[in-house]
Image (spheres, rainbow, N blue to C red):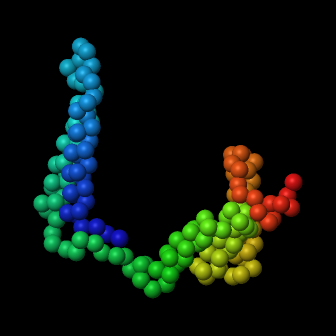
């Protein structure tokens, strides 16, 4: 998605104003000519000036333009990824981490053009690696399900 420079310029001005307002409560450093708010205020001024330049020099064009991948097969793939993540979140408590993650990865691989057996094998390997990383290395408790009940 491409936003028009006017929108980005307005956001930069707003960000600069918010940065400046945030520096008003910073304390002065005793014995120093430059306080702790000096450099953040310079950054705020640069944001405002850059935003103003973008807003003034932006040519009239559509405010937003969608890229070509958001049409056709690309849109289906993008929607599939979002749907897969939402389905994973809904199913992980009931099915457990191993089965849900394998289903998600293999389903996405097939959706994106992979072969069934290759997708299943790659998903199994990735799922086991993710499980080992999270459970053994990071000590993150993952939802247990049907397959996890078989593990010690």
Residue 21 occupies quadrant:
top left
Q: Which residue appears at 19% of the width and 42% of the height?
A: 45
Image-based side of 149 in relation to 58, left or right: right
On screen, residue 66 above or below 16: below
Q: Which residue appears at 14% of the width and 62% of the height?
A: 57
86 or 111, nearer to the observer: 86
- The extreme top residue here reads 31
Q: Position of residue 151 (x, y in %)?
A: 85, 58
Q: Position of residue 84 (x, y in %)?
A: 59, 72
- The extreme left residue here reads 56
Q: Position of residue 116 (x, y in %)?
A: 71, 81
Residue 111 occupies quadrant:
bottom right
Q: Which residue appears at 80% of the width and 60% of the height?
A: 148
145 or 83, nearer to the observer: 145
Q: Which residue appears at 31% of the width and 69% of the height?
A: 2
Q: Position of residue 129 (x, y in %)?
A: 73, 58
Image-based side of 76 in relation to 18, left or right: right
Image-based side of 30 in relation to 125, left or right: left
Res. 43 visible in picture? no
Res. 136 visible in picture? yes
Quadrant (top left, top right, bottom left, bottom right) of the N terminus: bottom left
Quadrant (top left, top right, bottom left, bottom right) of the C terminus: bottom right
53 or 85, nearer to the observer: 85
On screen, residue 139 above or below 53: above
- The extreme bottom residue here reads 72
On screen, residue 105 above or below 110: above
Count of numbered marks: 0
């Amino acid at each position: 998605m491409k936003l028009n420079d006017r929108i980005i310029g307005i956001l930069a001005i707003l960000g600069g104003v918010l940065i400046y307002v945030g520096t008003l409560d910073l304390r002065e450093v005793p014995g120093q000519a430059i306080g702790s708010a000096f450099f953040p205020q310079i950054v705020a001024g640069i944001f405002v000036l850059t935003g103003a330049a973008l807003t003034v020099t932006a040519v009239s064009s559509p405010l937003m333009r969608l890229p070509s991948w958001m049409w056709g097969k690309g849109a289906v793939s993008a929607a599939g990824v979002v749907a897969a993540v939402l389905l994973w979140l809904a199913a992980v408590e009931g099915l457990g981490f191993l089965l849900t993650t394998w289903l998600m990865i293999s389903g996405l691989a097939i959706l994106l053009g992979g072969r069934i057996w290759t997708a299943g094998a790659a998903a199994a390997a990735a799922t086991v690696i993710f499980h080992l990383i999270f459970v053994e290395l990071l000590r993150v408790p993952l939802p247990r399900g049907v397959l996890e009940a078989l593990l010690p």
